[in-house]
Image: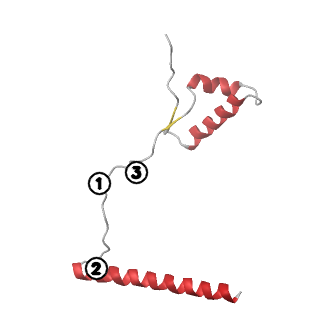
């Protein structure tokens, strides 16, 4: 038990030093630049930018959804349709049906 206590104390001490060292370094950097606010980096890449709510496309079209909701509970499409209905209610305005594909 004494081994664990000494390890915990060592880890806590190093964490406190790291935090205080980082704060001192940031304060020194801001003073040398003549700024009182923290510095930050603005990314110009689009990979990490959130452009707002994303649209959700359901794995069924509207006709399949209606048929699924009328099916027996023992059929899998019933539960898929129920899940889709839950998504429609949970994310109004963001959920869309899969487009109907016709094969001529």
Given residues 48 and 13, the one toward you in this image is 13
Q: Give the residue at the far top of this rendering.
A: 104
Contact, CB < 8 Å: mark 3 with mark 1? Answer: no
Instruction: Describe the element under mark 3 as helix, strand or loop.
Output: loop
Q: Which residue is mark 3?
A: 50
- Give the mark nearest the N terminus, 3 or 2: 2
Given residues 103 and 81, the one toward you in this image is 103
Given residues 102 and 14, the one toward you in this image is 14
Residue 102, image x and y in percent? Answer: 50, 15
Q: Residue at x 66, y 87 (%)?
A: 3
Q: Which residue is mark 1?
A: 44
Any part of residue 34 in sight:
no
Residue 103, image x and y in percent? Answer: 50, 13
Q: Look at the picture and state if 75 lies above or below 13.
A: above
Residue 38, image x and y in percent? Answer: 32, 74
Q: Which residue is mark 2?
A: 29
Contact, CB < 8 Å: mark 1 with mark 2? Answer: no
Q: Residue at x 74, y 28 (%)?
A: 75
Given residues 54 and 40, the one toward you in this image is 40
Q: Is residue 79 left or right of residue 52?
A: right
Front tag of 3 and 2: 2
Q: Look at the picture and state if 75 lies above or below 44.
A: above
- Give the mark nearest the N terminus, 3 or 1: 1
Which numbered circle lies on residue 18?
none
Q: Residue at x 28, y 79 (%)?
A: 30
Graded by Cα atoms within 10 Å as few (under 14), some (14 to 19) or many (20 or more), the crowding at tag 2 reads some
Residue 29, image x and y in percent? Answer: 28, 79
Give me the C-alpha separation between circle 3 and circle 2: 30 Å
């Amino acid at each position: 038990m004494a081994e664990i206590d000494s390890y915990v104390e060592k880890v806590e001490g190093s964490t406190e030093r790291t935090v205080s060292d980082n704060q001192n370094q940031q304060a020194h950097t801001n003073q040398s630049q003549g700024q009182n606010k923290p510095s930050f980096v603005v990314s110009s890449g689009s990979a990490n930018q959130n452009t707002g709510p994303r649209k959700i496309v359901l794995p069924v079209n509207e006709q399949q959804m209606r048929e699924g909701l009328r099916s027996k509970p023992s059929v899998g499409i019933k539960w898929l349709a129920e899940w889709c209905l839950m998504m429609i209610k949970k994310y109004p305005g963001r959920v869309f049906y899969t487009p109907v594909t016709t094969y001529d």
